[in-house]
Amino acid sequence: MQTLTRAGLIEKLYSHVGLSRSESAVLLEEVLEKIVSTLEGGDAVKISGFGTFAVRKKGSRIGRNPKTGEEVVIEPRLVLAFRPSQMLKNSVNEGMMKKVAKKG
């Protein structure tokens, strides 16, 4: 399985959109920065047909140290959550089923 990286995304923009590599890099960085700044502001980012990124609040809770078994209070914090769209779920499931069918 191959990991998609920033460099890979820049290369895809370069080959499919026709921008130069440097223009593709700038475009990708601007899009990512806009997503980050929106999330930092506490707002959700919804990409139609892909999914929604949102910041959620997790409350305080009791956890355990796995080595000692000692109870520890885990402080409240913010976490980043991603909820895929139904279209993305269906696409991933179909793609995975095709791979399984080819192997079998």
Image: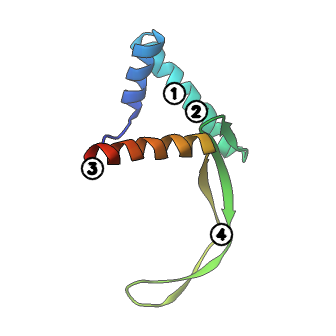
Sequence order check: which comes first, mark 3 or mark 1? 1
Residue 41 vertical position relative to residue 77 in the rendered view, above or below: above
How far separated are the C-alphas under marks 3 and 1? Answer: 41 Å
Q: Amino acid at mark 2?
A: Glu
- Name the mark on residue 29: 1
- Name the mark on residue 104: 3
Q: Amino acid at mark 3?
A: Gly
Q: Amino acid at mark 1?
A: Glu
- Name the mark on residue 76: 4
Query: On the image, which quarter does residue 90 sit in?
Result: top right
Sequence order check: which comes first, mark 2 or mark 4? 2
How far separated are the C-alphas under marks 2 and 4? Answer: 26 Å
Q: Secondary structure at mark 1?
A: helix
Q: Amino acid at mark 4?
A: Pro
> Which is nearer the eye, 51 or 34?
51
Is 14 left or right of 58, judged from the image as shown?
left
Q: Are marks 2 and 1 in contact (CB under 8 Å)?
A: yes
Sequence order check: which comes first, mark 4 or mark 1? 1
State the residue position of label 2. 33
